[in-house]
Image (cartoon, rainbow, N blue to C red):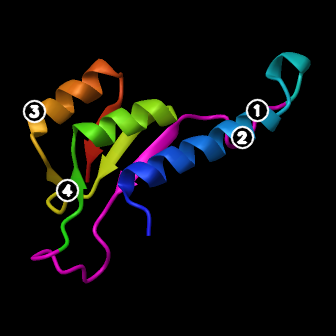
Amino acid sequence: MEGTDATILRAGEIMAAFDASAPSPQAGAAASTLSRQLTVVKVAKPNQDMRFDVPVIGVQTIASMKRAGASCLALDAGKCLLIDGDAVIEAADGHHICVTAD
């Protein structure tokens, strides 16, 4: 099973492949459903045992998002652990990545 960073990078590759195969808007074609920025959503599974398996976000996650072309990180509030949270927010700000939690 792949981890968060590998999943983000794979999603970026999929989005890039769809974007490359989409007709050009300059040619008068309608924008593709997938012609928007990539959003990463990190949530706990239902009934996840938070004693042993906590969803984690770190600076490396933000770096992977930047590489994949992601523009937004949505977190499960109160159920995701930010490793060095200030550095995560600083990295996200530096890469123009929105971070939100609900």
Cα–Cα span, label 3 and label 2: 33 Å
Cα–Cα span, label 2 and label 1: 5 Å
Q: The residue under label 2 is which amino acid type? A: Ala
Lower sequence index among marks 3 and 2: 2
Cα–Cα span, label 1 and label 4: 35 Å
State the residue position of label 4. 77
* Element assignment for label 3: helix
State the residue position of label 3. 86
At 64% from the left and 46% from the top, the residue drawn is: 14
Q: Which of marks 3 and 2 is in front?
A: 2
Is 41 part of what is drawn in magenta? yes
Up the image or down, 29 lies above or below 9; here it is above
**Residue 74 disc label:** none
State the residue position of label 2. 17
The image shows residue 62 at horizontal and vertical percentages of 32, 36
Is residue 10 left or right of 40 when viewed as pictured?
right
Q: The residue under label 3 is which amino acid type? A: Asp
